[in-house]
Amino acid sequence: MTQENTIVIEHRIFQGDYRLLKLSAPAIGPLVKPGQFVHLRVPRLADAVLRRPFSVFKADAAGLSILYKSVGKGTAALCSVREGEAANLLGPLGTGFPMIRENTKIPVLVAGGYGNAALYLQAARLPVKGVAFFGGRSAIDILCVDEFKTLGWDVRVTTDDGSLGKKGLVTAALDPWIAEQKNLQTLELFACGPNAMLKAVGERAIRNGLTAWLSMDRNMACGVGACLTCVIKRKTAEGWEWARCCKDGPVFESREILWDE
């Protein structure tokens, strides 16, 4: 974990209400692993005590990029930040996605909303390309399709309103695809999105004897495991324990998670 004073080198509308923020961060950028996140002290938000967590979209030796949407006070303030401004960054944080351990495995990515931004690094760095399932409310909420296709991924899209791809939840495309596979044991799943989607993906993985890595969606206030606001129940031999999404996760294997009923 490193704290770095970064510079905004690009900040623009990416698609619809989604924005791209690119930071010059040579100390943090090279350290980022797929599925990790960063904590940003938002400029022009002087009255805020806490930083804001963001998944990393792209990262390299020069810095990193995030995709975000204005959904609250912090991201609303972030929208006004201009290129050339300074922004203090803490990261990389959390436990991210593992690499597939066998070259016979076929990776399957499942994303809801702009969860696909958090899966991009995994897609870029996996040694084998597979199938990516993207779900969103409408066509404007389906991001990065061309970016994933350029990497060599087969992208399948669903939207709630049917404006792009198959109409329905992302599982409407995932379920029949899984049913068509002759050897399920070659599949390994990686998912990021709303908790309801993650639970659905995890249930399907367990039911079919598959490994699924889920990036849990929780509010991470401190980002370093101190405040315990982002805990989930993780199964143990004796029952269960609290696990911190910001430090023990955000990525957990589906069999670890004890979902609240």
Image (cartoon, grey):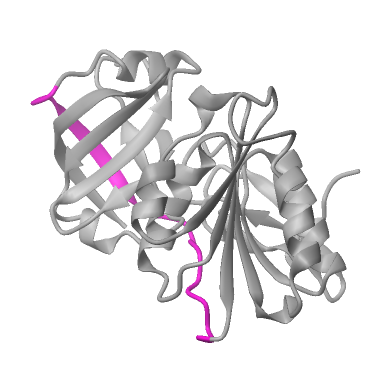
Q: Quadrant of the C terminus?
A: top right
Report if residue 110 is visible in the image: yes
In this rendering, the answer to whether 247 lies above or below 51 is below
Q: Which residues are magenta?
A: 83-103
Tell me which corner region of the image, top left, top right, bottom left or bottom right, holds residue 139: top right
Tell me which corner region of the image, top left, top right, bottom left or bottom right, holds residue 29: bottom left
Residue under the point 50% across and 18% down: 71
As rendered, which of 101 and 157 lies closer to the eye?
A: 157
As rendered, which of 204 and 184 lies closer to the eye?
A: 184
In this rendering, the answer to whether 27 lies above or below 220 is below
Residue under the point 49% across and 62% down: 95
Task: Tell me residue 110's x, y (percent).
Answer: 61, 52
77 lies left or right of 6:
right
Residue under the point 39% across and 14% down: 76
4 lies left or right of 256:
left
Q: Is residue 98 magenta?
A: yes
From the image, give the main secondary structure of the stretch colored magenta. loop
Residue under the point 37% across and 34% down: 67
As rendered, which of 234 and 24 lies closer to the eye?
A: 24
Task: Tell me residue 225's x, y (percent).
Answer: 52, 51
